[in-house]
């Protein structure tokens, strides 16, 4: 399990380096709003960390900083041994296309590209298009019969699963998901959640922001933010995310 520096947990001696480490990170906007305040957090490879907290607590800011979409105004972020603040523009672009994948509440699919094209576009900016690989990932997410559909011809859960395919197509070590089920009903959110469970079982490290109390008890650890500060970090008993995907269905009360 990882640790939350500053939340009273110590790392055992000889423990391997965390995959993600934030040291004393703050984000103060130009208008003076403090979005994040002195957050220190270490996340090990293979963890599933759920981030909770009220609206405005700094959850999206934290995710954006881990994924280099945003920069802290002070403090440092290291992912996979690389300090993000020391990276060139080119290195940052590569980091975003290979090391992290993002899934957002508002899908951000390109409306004029079909399912397959939305995913191969993400490959295009990394290793180059590989249609067979894209089809395989989409089939694995239950979208094999939707490849030529446009986003507005899909349900919310299907659209979000396309976003997951796009996020993982280049094999990132970390999946950052910001309220991925926030717009979905229980059936659709069950299908999205099951996809996350499977990715986690396959070794992807997940950092998930959610308001859904059922999802918040999932994973290996729950961290809570209040007014930009990290106020708690609690291990989830037994690491429930490692259970079978049928367990995921039962847990959220719905399946695809
Ligand atoms: N560009 C900005 N300029 C000024 N303040 C900002 C900016 N972006 C975010 N904030 C503020 O920073 C704080 C944290 O925002 P953040 O989006 O991280 O919250 P959140 O926990 O994700 O909230 P929600 O659950 O509503 O999505 C909020 O008070 C927000 O108003
Ligand atoms: Mg948010």
Image (spheres, grey):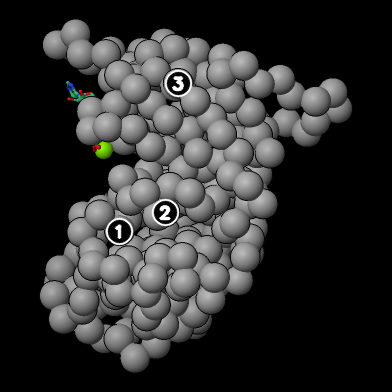
Residue shown at 47%/72% (left/top)? 250
List x then y, in percent, for residue 28.
Answer: 28, 13
Tell me the mark number nearer the camera, choosing from 1 and 3: 3
- Tag 2 secondary structure: helix
Q: Is residue 90 visible?
A: no
List x then y, in percent, for residue 184.
Answer: 23, 64
User: Label 2 vs label 3: CA separation?
Assistant: 19 Å
Residue shown at 50%/13% (left/top)? 24
In the picture shown, does residue 128 fall above or below 172? below
List x then y, in percent, for residue 206.
Answer: 51, 49
Tell me the mark number nearer the camera, choosing from 2 and 1: 2
Q: Quadrant of residue 124?
A: bottom left
Label pair 2/1, CB-CB below 8 angstroms: yes
Residue density around tag 2, few if under 14, some if 14–19, many if 20 or more, within 10 Å:
many
Residue picked out by circle 2: 215
In the picture shown, does residue 112 fall above or below 83? below
């Amino acid at each position: 399990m990882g640790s939350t520096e500053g939340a009273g947990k110590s790392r055992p001696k000889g423990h391997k380096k965390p995959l993600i480490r934030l040291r004393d990170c703050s984000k103060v906007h130009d208008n003076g709003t403090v979005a994040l305040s002195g957050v220190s957090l270490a996340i090990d490879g293979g963890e599933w960390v759920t981030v909770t907290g009220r609206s405005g607590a700094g959850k999206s800011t934290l995710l954006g900083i881990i994924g280099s979409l945003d920069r802290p105004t002070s403090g440092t972020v290291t992912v996979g041994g690389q300090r993000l603040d020391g990276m060139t523009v080119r290195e940052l672009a590569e980091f975003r296309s290979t090391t992290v994948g993002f899934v957002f509440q508002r899908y951000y699919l390109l409306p004029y590209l079909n399912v397959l094209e939305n995913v191969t576009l993400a490959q295009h900016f990394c290793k180059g298009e590989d249609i067979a690989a894209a089809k395989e990932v989409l089939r694995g997410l239950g979208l094999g019969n939707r490849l030529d559909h446009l986003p507005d011809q899909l349900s919310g859960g299907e659209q979000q699963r396309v976003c997951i395919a796009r996020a993982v197509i280049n094999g990132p070590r970390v999946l950052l998901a910001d309220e991925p089920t926030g717009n979905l009903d229980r059936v659709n959110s069950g299908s999205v959640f099951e996809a996350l469970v499977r990715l986690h079982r396959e070794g992807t490290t997940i950092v998930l922001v959610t308001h859904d109390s059922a999802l918040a008890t999932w994973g290996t650890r729950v961290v809570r933010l209040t007014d930009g500060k990290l106020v708690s970090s609690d291990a989830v008993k037994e690491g429930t995310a490692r259970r079978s995907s049928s367990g995921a269905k039962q847990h959220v009360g719905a399946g695809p």
